[in-house]
Image (cartoon, rainbow, N blue to C red):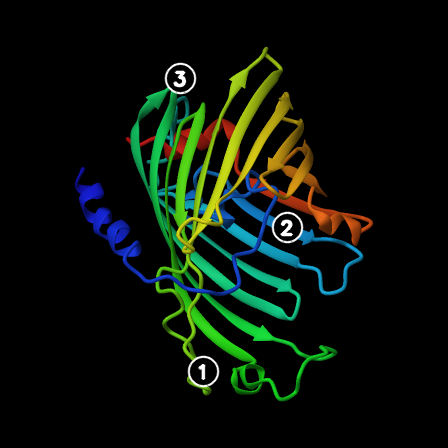
C-alpha cells in the first residue's frame, strides 16, 4: 500500500490540468500488439526485451491522408542474470535471477495528418509490483511515467488558402513541446486492464513560440482491457476493448471492441469494431522470436467514397528472452 500512497497524488494531479485543443495522438488498430505505445506502464510487462516497428497508412489514395511510423524498444531490468555455478566437479548449482521490478522503454515516432506533422521521442519508466499469483504465474501491478518531446509543425506548401489569413500569418509553423504521459495497469496470466493519460502538462512548455499565441495540447485518456478464454489445448479466444476519450468533456469517446482467436500462440485472426468509424480485420503469425501482424480498416463513414484501398497497418516485433525463464525473472523473491 505504501507504493499506492506514493503514486496516488500523481494520478490526482494529472486530472487537474485544464482542457486543450490540438492534434490528437496517433491512431493504432493493433493496440494489443504493442500496448506500450499507449500506456507506459506496459514497459517490461512480460519480461521480454522487445523491438517493435509499426507502419500505418490511412485512407490510401486520398491526398494528405494520415500516416504514422513508430519504432519502439522495451525491456525489464533484472537484479542479476540467470546463472549456473559449479560448486564442485560433481555438483552444479543453478540460481534463477531475482525479480526485477523496473521496466524501461522508448520509441520514436512520426505522425502526419494533412498539413500537420508531429515527430518526436518518448522515454518511459515503469515500476512493477508483485501481487500474488494466478494459475502459477505472477500478477503484476504496474505504474509508468513517460517523458515525451516532439516537434509540432504545419506545412502550407501547396496549400490553397487566403494569404491574408491572420492566424496562419501570425502562428508559428514549427514548435517544440516537452510533456509527460502516465499509465497504470494490472496484469495476470488470464486478463489485463490498463489506464493511461497523455500530455499531463497540456503543452504548457512550448519552445519557439515567438508569435505569443496561446497554445495547448489535447489530453487524452486510454482504457484498455482483455481476457483469455481457453477453448481447447490449442485454441484460445481473447476479447479485448480499447476506450479512448479526450479533454472535450468526454464528448469524443470512441471504442475499439476486438476479438481474436489464437492457434498454439503461433497464428491468430480477429475482428474489431471501432465505433462510428470502421470494421478492422486482424491477422498475425509468430515464427521463432519474430511476430508479424497486419490490420486492414474498412471505413464505415463517407470517407470510403474517396479512398479506394482503405487503411493498412503492419507491425513487426522481435522478442528476446526464453519464455521458460521469463516468469522466473519477474516473480518476486
Q: Nearer the viewer, mark 3 or mark 1?
A: 1
Q: Quick check: 140 above or below 8?
A: above
Residue at the far right: name it.
Answer: 308
Q: CA distance from mark 3 to mark 1?
A: 54 Å
Query: Looking at the image, is mark 3 or mark 1 earlier in the sequence?
Result: 3
Q: Is residue 21 above or below residue 292?
A: below
Q: State the residue in front, 167 or 171.
A: 167
> Residue 246 location, x and y as percent?
44, 53
Residue at label 3? Answer: 135
On the image, the x and y values in percent for residue 321 come to 52, 37
C-alpha span from label 1 to label 2: 31 Å
Looking at the rendered image, the disc whose residue lies closer to the viewer, 2 or 3, is 2
Asked if labels 2 and 1 touch by Cβ distance under 8 angstroms, the answer is no
Relative to 167, say whether 145 is above or below: above
Quadrant holding the N terminus: top left
Q: Which image quadrant for residue 330?
A: top left
Instruction: Report the residue marked by disc 1.
Output: 209
Q: Quadrant of the C terminus?
A: top left
In the image, residue 209 lies at what x, y percent? 45, 82
> At x 67% / y 52%, what residue is drawn?
56
Camera-side residue of 317 and 64: 64
Q: Which residue is mark 2?
A: 54
Alpha-carbon span between mark 2 and mark 3: 33 Å
Task: Kindly tell me whether residue 204 is visible in this rendering.
Answer: yes
Q: Secondary structure at mark 2?
A: strand
Residue visible at 65% across and 76% down? 155
Q: Is residue 257 above or below residue 78?
A: above
**On the rendered structure, is 182 left or right of 173?**
left
Q: In x, y percent, where is residue 278?
A: 66, 41
The numbered mark, 1 or 2, whose residue comes first in the sequence reads: 2
Amino acid at each position: 500500500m505504501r507504493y499506492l500512497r506514493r503514486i496516488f497524488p500523481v494520478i490526482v494531479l494529472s486530472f487537474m490540468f485544464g482542457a486543450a485543443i490540438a492534434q490528437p495522438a496517433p491512431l493504432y488498430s493493433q493496440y494489443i500488439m504493442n500496448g506500450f505505445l499507449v500506456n507506459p506502464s506496459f514497459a517490461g510487462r512480460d519480461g521480454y526485451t522487445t523491438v517493435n516497428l509499426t507502419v500505418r497508412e490511412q485512407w490510401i489514395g486520398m491526398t494528405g491522408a494520415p500516416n504514422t511510423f513508430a519504432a519502439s524498444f522495451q525491456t525489464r531490468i533484472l537484479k542479476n542474470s540467470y546463472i549456473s555455478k559449479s560448486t564442485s566437479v560433481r555438483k552444479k548449482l543453478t540460481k534463477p535471477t531475482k525479480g526485477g521490478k523496473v521496466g524501461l522503454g522508448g520509441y520514436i515516432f512520426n505522425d502526419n495528418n494533412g498539413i500537420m506533422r508531429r515527430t518526436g521521442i518518448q522515454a518511459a519508466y515503469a515500476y512493477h509490483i508483485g501481487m500474488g499469483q494466478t494459475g502459477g504465474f505472477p500478477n503484476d501491478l504496474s505504474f509508468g511515467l513517460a517523458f515525451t518531446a516532439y516537434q509540432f509543425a504545419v506545412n502550407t506548401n501547396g496549400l490553397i488558402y487566403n494569404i491574408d489569413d491572420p492566424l496562419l500569418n501570425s502562428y508559428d509553423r514549427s514548435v517544440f513541446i516537452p510533456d509527460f504521459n502516465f499509465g497504470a495497469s494490472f496484469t495476470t496470466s488470464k486478463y489485463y486492464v490498463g489506464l493511461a493519460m497523455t500530455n499531463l502538462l497540456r503543452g504548457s512548455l512550448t519552445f519557439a513560440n515567438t508569435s505569443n499565441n496561446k497554445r495547448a495540447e489535447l489530453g487524452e485518456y486510454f482504457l484498455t482491457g482483455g481476457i483469455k478464454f481457453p477453448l481447447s489445448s490449442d485454441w484460445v479466444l481473447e476479447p479485448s476493448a480499447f476506450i479512448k476519450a479526450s479533454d472535450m468533456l468526454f464528448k469524443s469517446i470512441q471504442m475499439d471492441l476486438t476479438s481474436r482467436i489464437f492457434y498454439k500462440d503461433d497464428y491468430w485472426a480477429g475482428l474489431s469494431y471501432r465505433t462510428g468509424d470502421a470494421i478492422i480485420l486482424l491477422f498475425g503469425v509468430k515464427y521463432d522470436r519474430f511476430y508479424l501482424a497486419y490490420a486492414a480498416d474498412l471505413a464505415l463513414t463517407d470517407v470510403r467514397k474517396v479512398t479506394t484501398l482503405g487503411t493498412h497497418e503492419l507491425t513487426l516485433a522481435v522478442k528476446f528472452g526464453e519464455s521458460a525463464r521469463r516468469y522466473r525473472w519477474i516473480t518476486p523473491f
